[in-house]
Image: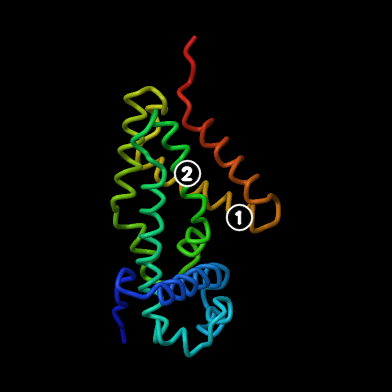
Amino acid sequence: MVVKNEPVAGQSRTRARTRRAILDAAVLVLGQDASATMSAVAERAGVARSTLQRYFPDRESLTSALAEYATERIHEAVRSARIGDGTAAEALNRLVSEYFDTYELVFLAFTSDDDWAASADDEPDESDAALAELVERGHADGTIDPRLSPAWMGQFVWAMLYAAGMHVRSGAAAKHEALTQCLYTLRKAVAVPETS
């Protein structure tokens, strides 16, 4: 049974906060263990199982909401990065910084058996288009190596974010240290080689 969740805009602030807390908890719990129970999600969110079921009556409705939530978070990151400002390399740096805050969603997508994670890889959306346009702009403005295709960069960015998140999760680095290394790697990877 799929229950369509009402849009967040029409909800009370308390209801919207509770919904977001549940979704954030689901990202963390299911990102660590794709087979985790709804009870584990409720516990992590700090709500009763009955509260969770009022928002998401079953796993399918939670999974569907997670797909929408992931898309919203990624689009928020694109907007926050102000990708139209500065050079393309500067904008890409800001975009990866914003994306870094979503690394738990990246884990969920990489580790989930749910259909939404698989379809997210297959269907380009506006965030994919924004990244592709950014790479092409970098080719034109001379700040991104033209040998790096937009498709390659799309895969590279998400793989790098996964690696940075794993670095944090494993305890090898604090979040800010992993972000610093991630951005350093990005700058080195996209730099246009100097000609002699």
Between residues 16 and 144, which one lies in front from this camera angle?
A: 16
Residue 66 on image: x %, y %: 40, 69
Between residues 149 and 135, which one lies in front from this camera angle?
A: 135
Q: Is residue 1 left or right of residue 21?
A: left
Tell me, for residue 166, which label it has, or none: 1
Q: Which amino acid type corresponds to the residue marked 1 in the rendered image?
A: Met
Of all residues, the one furthest to the bottom in this rendering is 50
SS state under label 1? helix
- Tell me how far mark 2 sits from mark 1, CA to CA: 16 Å
Residue at horizontal 36 percent and vertical 29 percent from the top: 138
Mark 2, Cα crowd under 10 Å, few <14 / some 14-19 / many 20+, is many
Residue at horizontal 57 percent and vertical 79 percent from the top: 46
SS state under label 2? helix
Between residues 153 and 85, which one lies in front from this camera angle?
A: 85
**Residue that label 2 marks:** 96
Of all residues, the one furthest to the front in this rendering is 13
Q: Which amino acid type corresponds to the residue marked 2 in the rendered image?
A: Val
Tell me, for residue 129, which label it has, or none: none
Quarter where residue 89 is shown: top left
Residue at horizontal 38 percent and vertical 40 percent from the top: 82
Residue 8 on image: x %, y %: 34, 70
Q: What colour scheme governs how the chains and residues are painted in the rendered image of this protein?
A: rainbow
Of all residues, the one furthest to the top in this rendering is 196
Between residues 40 and 158, which one lies in front from this camera angle?
A: 40
Mark 1, Cα crowd under 10 Å, few <14 / some 14-19 / many 20+, is some
Quarter where residue 90 is shown: top left
Q: Nearer the viewer, mark 2 or mark 1?
A: 2
Residue at horizontal 37 percent and vertical 72 percent from the top: 65
Residue 38 on image: x %, y %: 50, 83
Who comes first in sequence, dot 2 or dot 1? 2
Task: Name the quarter where the N terminus is drawn.
Answer: bottom left
